[in-house]
Amino acid sequence: MASTAQTTKTIQKYTVTHDLTGAPTLTSLVAGESESKGAGGGWSEVLSGLKTLLETGSQLPFQSGPEKG
């Protein structure tokens, strides 16, 4: 996985590239195809959580991570 960030005065652009070539099992997991079995939320969950964190400064209640001190 690779990422880059670009900032201007008012815009933050964050690009994530996740190359899953040759990894079909991981590809289906990241795509969220196993959610009904309780396995991961895929990139939609990750990006939703990142968007919420950036907009509000708080993580979504169902996501774990370091607590703010």
Image (cartoon, rainbow, N blue to C red):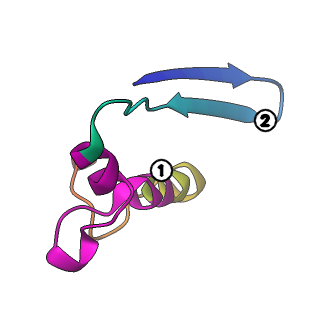
- Dividing the picture into quadrants, the one containing residue 58 is bottom left
Dot 1 amino acid type? Leu
- Residue corresponding to mark 2: 11
User: Residue 52: where, in percent of width, then height?
Assistant: 51, 59
User: Residue 64: where, in percent of width, then height?
Assistant: 21, 56
Image mark count: 2
Q: Quick check: 30 left or right of 5?
A: left
- Residue corresponding to mark 1: 50
Residue at the location (22% across, 47% down)?
25
Q: Magenta segment range?
A: 25-48
Residue at the location (51% across, 29% down)?
17
For label 2, count other residues whose C-alpha is less than 10 Å away and answer few (under 14), some (14-19) or many (20+). few
Q: Is residue 21 magenta?
A: no
Quarter of the picture containing the N terminus is top left
Q: Is residue 45 magenta?
A: yes
Could you tell me if residue 69 is visible in this image?
Answer: no
